[in-house]
Amino acid sequence: MSPTKPAPGRKSVAVVGAGAAGVLVAGRLLDLAARRRIPLDVVLIGPGEPGHGVAYGTRAPEHLLNVPAGKLGATTDDPAGFARWTGGPPGEFVAREHFGAYLAGYLRAVARHSEPGRLWRVREEVARIRRRSPGLSLESGSGVRFAAAAVLAIGAGSPGVRWAPDSLRAGGRFVADPWVPGALEDIPPAEDVLLVGTGLTMVDMALTLDRPGRVLHAVSRHGLLPRPHAAAPVPPVALPGTADDLASLRLLVRDHLGKCLRETRDWRPAVDGIRPRTAELWQRLSAADRRRFLAEDHAYWEVLRHRMPPSSAAGLARIRRAGRLTVSRGEVLAAEGGEVALTGGRVRVGAVVNCTGPDPDAKRNPLVARLVADGLAAPGPLGIGLATAPDGRLRPTNAPLWTLGAPRKGDLWETTAIPEIRRAADDLARSLVADVISVDDGEGRPA
Ligand SMILES: Cc1cc2nc3c(=O)[nH]c(=O)nc-3n(C[C@H](O)[C@H](O)[C@H](O)COP(=O)(O)OP(=O)(O)OC[C@H]3O[C@@H](n4cnc5c(N)ncnc54)[C@H](O)[C@@H]3O)c2cc1C
């Protein structure tokens, strides 16, 4: 049973959400506690196996990581850690479930050597967080816990369904969230399927649902497919210069891609070279330019940036050639029984699978809705995620409440993949230790 109150002389940090981000923050906090001899209780609260979350909870062997194993170590100082764990080549794209198992093992290993730091695990959802003096209280099914600070590692949540007409949502053939365990089990095996969205989730779903005699129809507003990773990747090429508005940014990126293509015969190193600069470039844009980027450029950027493993691309090409997958532009207008009306025609299907990705409105998470209602959090720029200070602390108050990963997308744009989450977890753990845990508040001993 985890402590509901820190023992005398100890401090406690609650990490809400036990997916990849929660595990990486908890791991870094425990590591710092051990190195600096801090009597710290890290309470990791959230359902599910630690480290698995939405992305790495899948058991399907065809659902691959979209980052090579050699770049996915749990800590910034050991990016090769995961490749060592798999024992395979660093350039390999392995099944996502292995990464969940690796993260769970990483946390267990850090916790074994964290004294005087200690890890506590609570498999519940946090319903409400309140400000106390000092610290916070967190309410969940088993009661109220007190902590000096909390980190919201709550991810992006389930896919948005606002695009789906009522007639589709009301019928029994809509799979609103394909990542819920067992969500695909009721799809009639002999019937065709409509996949709405043509990004990486669609790629996973197409590879899982493909079978002889079935046609998968994939549609999205733009009909664009993710590009594949290169079989022999070239190192990133840094973006030269900067831009303060969207028109100049478009020119800068176009020139950068063109030059890189001429010099390396590949555009990917140019895209990878923009990645470390994305947050800075995004923050230089006005709200109007960010909106225009979302409306006009976003879909093109996404397919270049979020690429699929070469083997997934080969699998997709194979089922397209066999006539078992069509990819086109289209929006869903209405559904009547198995008949779905699209902007480009009609299809008769046994199921419609939502592959559109997360809804940017963080308030769909009940805890976040409550925090916003209580004035402890506010929506992020353009209503995407949550408003945060540069160190990840929630705005508008200075309550000891931080976040990382998807909730920071409105502020940073590039923040949801493991390399960025790992960096953020590292920075966050250091600022928590410096700002909160080491400060003597009269209850705990200063570190
Ligand atoms: C299908 C998919 C595949 C992906 N593949 C890759 C990849 O190959 N490589 C890569 O770098 N990135 C990938 N990503 C990006 C992904 O967002 C991150 O890599 C990472 O998994 C995000 O982890 P997270 O912990 O922030 O979020 P999540 O995995 O969503 O975990 C958040 C957790 O918080 C919990 N939670 C929410 N609210 C509460 C509450 N009130 N109380 C307690 N717990 C709560 C949820 O139950 C959940 O378990 C993928 C994303 C998806 C959706």
Image (cartoon, rainbow, N blue to C red):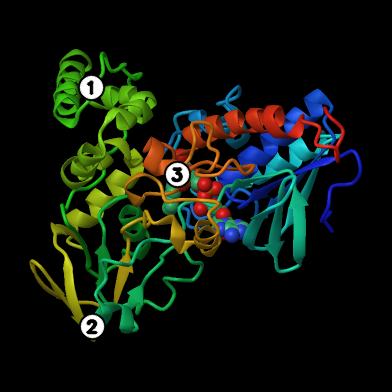
Q: Secondary structure at mark 1?
A: loop
User: In this rendering, does residue 149 appear at all?
Assistant: yes
Q: Residue 230, can we see it?
A: no
Helix, strand, or loop for circle 3?
A: loop
Q: Which amino acid type corresponds to the residue marked 1 in the rendered image?
A: Ala
Residue at position x 36%, y 40% from top? 309
Dot 1 alpha-carbon crowd within 10 angstroms: few under 14, some 14 to 19, many 20 or more: some
Res 105 → quadrant: top right
Q: Which image quadrant for residue 128?
A: bottom right
Query: Mark 1 vs mark 2: which is more N-terminal?
Result: 1
Mark 1 → mark 2, Cα distance in angstroms: 49 Å
Image-based side of 228 in relation to 89, left or right: left
Q: Position of residue 431 (x, y in %)?
A: 64, 29
Camera-nearest residue between 336 and 241: 241
**Pointer 3 and pointer 2: residues touching (CB < 8 Å)?**
no
Sequence-first tag of 3 and 2: 2
Q: Secondary structure at mark 2?
A: loop
Instruction: Report which residue position mark 1 lands on.
Output: 243
Q: Which mark is residue 387?
A: 3
394 horizontally vs 318: left or right: right
In the rendered view of the protein, which quadrant contains the C terminus?
Answer: top right
| Residue with the mark numbered 2 | 338
Residue plotted at (31% across, 63% down): 210
Q: Are marks 1 and 3 in contact (CB under 8 Å)?
A: no
**Most foreground residue, 142 or 219:** 142
Residue found 21% across the figure and 18% down from its top: 260
